[in-house]
Structures are given as structure tokens and as C-alpha cells.
Amino acid sequence: MPARAAPAYLSRPVELLTAIAAKKQPFDELVGHDQRARAPLRYRVDYTSNAIEGNTLTPVETTLVLRKGITISSKPLKDHLEALDHDDAIRYVRHLARQTTPLLACAICIV
């Protein structure tokens, strides 16, 4: 069986990073680095990812769980824990992305 060729973007990492930066610039200009402005997007990502996996929390409930730390009495505890765990994982990945040291496989395994 012939070996699969690596995706083209892996052979040109500088070009890939340049393209990503160009696509990200309008978002950064719109939102900036204001964490309060990014919070609704962060909660939406948490909600959407968890909903795909079958979590029954609504977008508003997910925001309440993450922002206020409350539990919704009619929802399973596992749904609350999934929302909190997903948010922790996303924050950890963002932390890793801000590091200047090379990303190691063991760091990804923690997620």
C-alpha cells in the first residue's frame, strides 16, 4: 500500500500561519483582546461542543453554569460537569497556544 502524502499545509507552515493571521485579523479588530467581549463566543463554543455530544443544557443554562457556577435542578449533574470540563480544556489549550516553547505531545494528552 503506498504511503500517504502529508497534507500540503504541513510542508509550508509559515504560509499557513500567515494565512491564519490574515483571516483572524478582522475578528481581532472587532473584538480586540477584551475578555468580556470574547466571553459570549466562548460560552457558545462550550454549549455547541457539548450539545453535539448530547448534553441537554441550553445556551443560557451553559452560560449560567460557567459564569455563576450554579447548577440547574432539572438537568443531570454530568451535563454540568461536562460544561465545566470543556471550558477548563479550552482555557488550557489557549494557555498552551500563548506559550513560546514548542508544544509537546504530553501537553495534548492532558487535554
Image (spheres, rainbow, N blue to C red):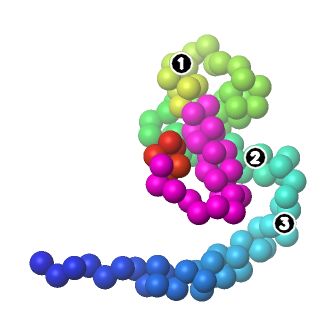
Dot 3: element: helix
Residue at the image point whose x is 80% and y is 67% from the top: 28
CA separation in Å, label 1 and label 2: 23 Å
- Counting residues from the start of the chain, the first of labels 3 and 2 encountered is 3
Q: Is residue 46 left or right of residue 27?
A: left
Amino acid beneath label 1: Leu
Q: Secondary structure at mark 2?
A: helix
State the residue at coordinates (78%, 52%): 38
| Span highlighted in magenta in the image | 84-106
Give the quadrant of residue 43.
Answer: top right
Q: Which mark is residue 77?
A: 1
Residue 25 screen position, x and y as percent: 77, 74
Looking at the image, tell me whether mark 1 or mark 2 is earlier in sequence order: 2
7 relative to 78, above or below: below
Residue 92 within the segment the image draws in magenta: yes
User: Spatial distance from mark 3 to mark 2, Cα to Cα?
Assistant: 14 Å
| Amino acid bearing label 3 | Leu
Crowd tier of the residue under label 1, counting other residues whose Cα lies within 10 Å: few below 14, some 14–19, many 20 or above: few
Q: Residues within 10 Å of mark 2 (few under 14, many from 20)?
A: few
| On screen, residue 80 above or below 35 | above
Q: Residues within 10 Å of mark 3 (few under 14, many from 20)?
A: few
Residue at the disc numbered 2: 40
